[in-house]
Amino acid sequence: MSEQTSQSETYLKPLPQKDALSAPFWDALHAHELKIQRCADCSRYAFPPVSHCPGCLSTQLAWTAVSGKGKVQAAVTVDHAPMPAFKADVPYNVALVDLAEGVRVWTNVIGCAPAEVVCDMPVEAVFEDVTPDHTLLKFRPAR
Ligand SMILES: [Zn+2]
């Protein structure tokens, strides 16, 4: 065993599993960009990653940089850690954020107390590098 312990070995929360469909999303987050798929045929945005446009079934989906601006649609405060790795985080929130581009993401709003996260609250994307290989999408109150 090496003397160095990687951040991946010490990060104990579940990490996303990148696959062929979602790799561009995770790679963009790692570069601190938010990209989602946009249909070249009907211009609709799609999230989570899909193989066919949910509007017209086209396969012509292009990864497109988006604003990262959105509004909280719903939020709950988690007071009991679902697993030991989350104990230090409680209370924290889990939120649904509607991006300006019309897609909804599950996330956490950080940078404020969980009770301050309310419906219609304007938020903006932030990128949390949790391991050298994993960056997570979170949101904070819009500035
Ligand atoms: Zn389409």
Image (cartoon, helix red, strand yellow):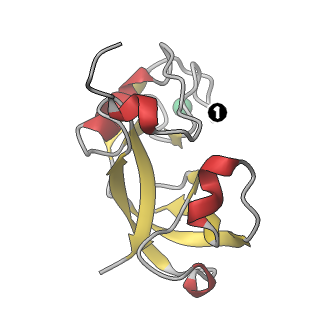
Where residue 81 sits in the image (x, y, percent)? 72, 58
Task: Tell me: 16 left or right of 26.
Answer: right
Q: Ligand 1 lies in which image quarter? A: top right
Residue 64 or residue 84, whichever sits in front: 84
Residue 21 or residue 83, whichever sits in front: 83
Q: Is residue 96 visible?
A: no
Q: Residue furthest left?
A: 31
Q: Indicate the quadrant where residue 53 lies.
A: top right
Q: Residue at 35% across / 37% down in the picture?
A: 131
Indicate whether 97 appears above or below 106: below
Q: Residue furthest bottom?
A: 116
Indicate whether 130 appears above or below 23: below
Task: Tell me: 96 left or right of 43.
Answer: right
Indicate whether 4 appears above or below 64: above
Three-letter amino acid code at the position of disc 1: Pro
Q: Indicate the quadrant where residue 24 lies.
A: top left
Residue 122 or residue 40, whichever sits in front: 122
Task: Tell me: 61 left or right of 16.
Answer: left
The C terminus appears in which quarter of the rendering? bottom left
The N terminus appears in which quarter of the rendering? top left
Q: Is residue 61 visible?
A: yes
Where residue 109 sits in the image (x, y, percent)? 50, 68
Where residue 74 sits in the image (x, y, percent)? 68, 70
Secondary structure at badge 1 equals loop
Q: Residue at 42% across / 39% down in the picture?
A: 36
Q: Residue under circle 1?
A: 54
- Label 1 within 8 A of ligand 1 by Cβ: yes
Q: Residue at 43% across / 64% down in the picture?
A: 139
Q: Residue at 57% across / 36% down in the picture?
A: 48
Q: Indicate the quadrant where residue 23 lies.
A: top left
